[in-house]
Amino acid sequence: MKKLLQAITAITALGMVGTAYAEKINVYAWSQSIEPKILNQFTAATGIEVVIDGYTSNEELLSKLKAGGTNYDIAFPSQHFVKIMINEGLLLPIDAKNEPAYNRIRDEYKGRWWDPENKYSVPFAYGSAGYTVNRDYYKGPIDSWGVFFEPPAELKGKIAVFAAPDEVIPAAQNYLGIEYCTESSADMKKVYELLKKQKESVAIYTNDNIRDRIGSGEVYATSWWDGESIKARTKSGLNVEYAMPKEGLVGWVDSAVIPQGATNVSGAKKFINFMSQMDIATEWSNMYGHDFAIKLDIPKLTANPSNAPEIYPTVPVKMSKACSPAAQNLVDKVWTSLMQ
């Protein structure tokens, strides 16, 4: 029901109710990542109706695509999930090198390991996952993952953690000095023990309503993404701060892909090419609160190192990886045991 309401809200905002369009595309994107204003511009330029649905984790997206029958024309998985989806045959080829969008990708984001030929994906937003604290309630240091995983007394019972392992386990690995996607049972036992001990201080595992929870004081610290934290600070006026743990943040790059079962591949490519235009991508970046792998109009960006430290981190950002089956099995075992 929640997702149905999201779709209806987006359609209503675009002025689509009661209007017949010759074409439509079904977009499955990170919740609240694309504002209706930009979708309205796409519809005005192309005459293609946009129906948008939202997800809050890569795991949710992967599960939905594996179940089939979605008819989504566009999705935006992070880099390691792009690789998983390619390996599992869940994506249709885009052949980005034949599309205008390809020449708009910054050179350092072309041909990356998850899709060396950009056959299946076009990278868009990138950033980090870390944790945010509400400074009205917690005044202490936030220069280490230790504050989050082994919290001081004032944070006990006041921590929210993502409800999926995708960025939680890599963060724990950063703190413990363990390589991502390790196949060592001994190392993953250390991860489990850390997370099990942290659980005593966790109020909730969730990816939903994070801004409300941290803003109201329901929790004082929460797993979060850089762009969401900056929007909470600058647009919602919350006294929050995004941590800069010395052990490193968890990095991600979200790319546009066309899932198997897409009903409008041509419309999907038009969407990718439209959204990659410099003026549109710049507007999207300003609204979303993230930097982009697409070339942007730098003078028109509202964020810079002086006013947006969240997206200009001063600590290492370590990109998540696609794990081997053996390593992923260990991740699944840790998380399943933790959630019991």
Image: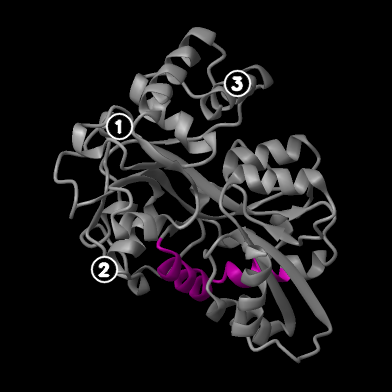
**Magenta stretch encompasses residue 166:** no
Range drawn in magenta: 270-289
Q: Please name the residue that numbered disc 2 is placed on.
A: 237
Q: Please name the residue that numbered disc 3 is placed on.
A: 333
Q: Position of residue 109 (x, y in %)?
A: 53, 48
SS state under label 2: loop
Q: Please name the residue that numbered disc 1 is placed on.
A: 145
Q: Give the farthest residue toward the top.
A: 186
Q: Position of residue 180 (x, y in %)?
A: 49, 24
Which sits earlier in the primary sequence, circle 2 or circle 3?
2
Which sits earlier in the primary sequence, circle 1 or circle 3?
1
SS state under label 1: loop
The residue lying toward the viewer, choosing from 53 and 81, is 53
SS state under label 3: helix
- Whole-number angstrom distance, CA of label 2 to CA of label 1: 25 Å
Are the two marked residues, 1 and 3, in contact with CB atoms closer than 8 angstroms? no
